[in-house]
Amino acid sequence: MPEVDRAAASREAVRKRRARATVKASIASGARTALDVLDTATREPAGIEGSIRVTEYLLSIPSIGVTKLNRILEALEISPVKRLGGLGRLQRDRLREFIVERQPKRRRSRLVVLAGPTAVGKGTVAAYIRDHFPEVHLSVSATTRHPRPGEVEGVNYYFVSDEGFDRLIDQNELLEHATVHNAFRYGTPRAPIDRALAAGDSALLEIDIQGARQVRAAMPEATLVFLLPPSWDELVRRLVGRGTEDEEERERRLRTAKVELAAADEFDYRVVNDDVARAAQEVVDLMKIHGE
């Protein structure tokens, strides 16, 4: 290897080592939760979080020392040489459950986030809740896309221009916002949510997965619910049957949906939308549990 390449490789190794040390220090100080680091490693196994050894990760958690470490790894059936990004699904699930059980028990808020892949029926389930459970405050998102047939301003969405959306961001009036399917922007107005929670009401956000992650970062006490289709074939059928996208757009959304489905493990609960009324009732029941 040429001298210049060796020097560059050495600098990159130092950079990554320092980045890993920063992540571990943030867990130890409480600046980041161990669960957040694990979820990031799951989403980005080749990233800094994914490159951290499980042993180093566990030792960065307060109250876990070398004495406990081997016992924990043995119970979780994880090799000490494993890195977070290289864990198998079952190993990751066991580690996540272990971390969740160690977190201090806290009262969750009445805020529930409903997310899931495209065409899974998030809007249909949310509309059912709006029509049948009036005690639930259903957040109305702002979007830069045009209304679909039958959609009503202020009921389904607030339809705004790109300039108007920029103003909402600049004035910090959105709890979360994201560009969805590399096309239009969506965001949740903050003020109605704050008012509903201050009044002791339940609030439901029906948003995309990017937005759900932002809400989790801003309000860790929120409960995240992932809406699943009964099967992949059913998801395809719903998207094609909807008839609101051309063939190119459908193919793009299906590619996105495959990626989105992999995010289900990041959520607190998973609800299968095999029947709208049943799925809506399950979501409302979760809101009651965490609002008590």
Image (tube, rainbow, N blue to C red):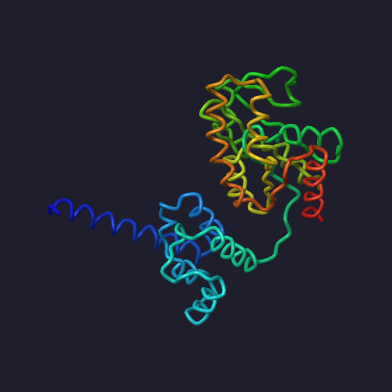
Residue drawn at the location 82% of the way across and 44% of the way down: 281
Q: Kindly indicate the quadrant of the structure image that contains residue 167.
A: top right
265 to the left or right of 8: right
In the picture, the quarter occupied by the N terminus is bottom left
Q: Report x, y in % for residue 136.
A: 81, 41
Please state which of residues 98 and 107 is positioned toward the viewer in this rendering.
98
Residue drawn at the location 53% of the way across and 41% of the way down: 259
Q: Report x, y in % for residue 126.
A: 76, 36
Q: Is residue 74 above or below residue 54?
A: below
Q: Report x, y in % for residue 201.
A: 81, 45
272 to the left or right of 255: right
On the question of residue 170 being in view, the answer is no
In the picture, the quarter occupied by the C terminus is bottom right
Q: Is residue 83 above or below residue 112?
A: below
Q: Is residue 221 above or below residue 76?
A: above
Task: Give the residue furthest to the left.
Answer: 2
Q: Report x, y in % for residue 113.
A: 69, 44
Q: Kindly indicate the quadrant of the structure image that contains residue 49.
A: bottom left
Task: Give the residue furthest to the front.
Answer: 233
Task: Give the residue furthest to the bottom.
Answer: 67
Residue drawn at the location 21% of the way across and 52% of the way down: 8
Q: Kindly indicate the quadrant of the structure image that contains residue 23.
A: bottom left
